[in-house]
Image: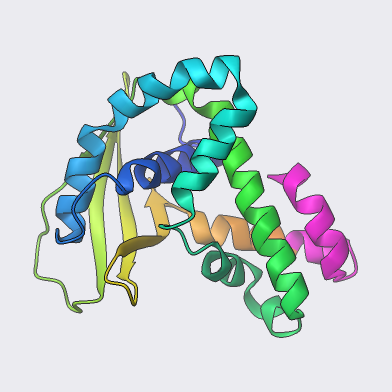
């Protein structure tokens, strides 16, 4: 199975969705290992709700992400150089559009990838910083195994959060930033117009 942008989006949200279920005292590797053990059960539990009430399913996902994902920080990184010229309102609008587009993508692809397995690999060396970590993983499908890595940071409240993900050489942050830059170039660098078109482009 080819690793696509849709697949990367699914993987990061599956991890984050179960992220809240583990102790806050664990290392980033222990977080990942424990949460991935619960992924299949979580997906199966939510399948029926997704089929019967997709609107409630997406709201539940959104409520679960609120305390564990800094969408404003991720959105600013995606906007890159254009974030400097954006107003506070434009930053909020893009953050909302970015979050909604990812939630919608995850919801629509949940069932498609429910039978895959994600293994967390043990750290090969001590963390260089107590507040940052890189966690290596492997995604096991019926036909292949793909390497991956989470970039994580420890926020001011002492909670580990993902800020980027790489799968089989594909960098999620760079993919979305390139997409944003492309939209800016095609729309005369009109940030408001790009925000309007973002959801349809993902």
In the depicted view, which residue is nearer to us: 196 or 2?
Answer: 196
Residue 60 in view of the camera: yes
Q: In this view, does 9 lie to the left or right of 34?
A: right
Q: Which percent across, then down, holds residue 187?
A: 89, 63
Using the image, determine if residue 170 lies above or below residue 186.
above
Q: Does the magenta stretch include residue 79?
A: no
Using the image, determine if residue 67 lies above or below residue 139.
below
The secondary structure making up most of the magenta span is: helix
To which quarter of the image does residue 50 belong?
top right
What colour scheme governs how the chains and residues are painted in the rendered image of this protein?
rainbow
Q: In what quadrant of the picture does the C terminus appear?
A: top right
In the depicted view, which residue is nearer to us: 7 or 62?
Answer: 62
How many marks overall? Answer: 0
Q: In what quadrant of the picture does the N terminus appear?
A: top left
Name the residue at 38% across, 25% down.
43
Q: Which percent across, then down, holds residue 46?
A: 43, 24
Q: Which percent across, then down, holds residue 153?
A: 32, 69
Residue 114 in view of the camera: no
Q: Is residue 2 left or right of residue 178?
A: left
Q: In this view, does 33 lie to the left or right of 168?
A: left
Name the residue at 66% across, 70% down.
79
Q: Which percent across, then down, holds residue 192?
A: 85, 66
Name the residue at 70% across, 54% down.
97
In the depicted view, which residue is nearer to us: 136 or 44?
Answer: 44
In the depicted view, which residue is nearer to us: 82 or 54?
Answer: 54
Q: Magenta segment range?
A: 182-202
């Amino acid at each position: 199975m080819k690793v696509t942008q849709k697949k990367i989006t699914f993987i990061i949200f599956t991890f984050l969705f179960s992220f809240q279920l583990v102790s806050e005292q664990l290392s980033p590797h222990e977080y990942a290992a424990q949460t991935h053990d619960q992924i299949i059960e979580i997906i199966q539990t939510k399948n029926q709700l997704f089929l019967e009430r997709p609107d409630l399913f997406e709201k539940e996902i959104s409520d679960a992400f609120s305390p564990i994902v800094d969408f404003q920080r991720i959105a600013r990184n995606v906007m890159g150089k254009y974030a400097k010229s954006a107003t506070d309102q434009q930053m909020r609008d893009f953050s909302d559009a970015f979050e909604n587009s990812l939630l919608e993508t995850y919801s629509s692809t949940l069932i498609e990838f429910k039978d895959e397995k994600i293994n967390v690999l043990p750290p090969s060396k001590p963390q260089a910083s107590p507040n940052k970590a890189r966690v290596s993983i492997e995604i096991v499908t019926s036909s292949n195994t793909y390497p991956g890595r989470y970039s994580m940071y420890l926020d001011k409240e002492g909670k580990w959060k993902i800020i980027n993900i790489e799968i089989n050489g594909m960098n999620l942050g760079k993919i979305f930033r390139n997409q944003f830059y492309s939209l800016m170039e095609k729309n005369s660098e009109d940030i408001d117009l790009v925000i309007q078109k973002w959801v349809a482009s993902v």
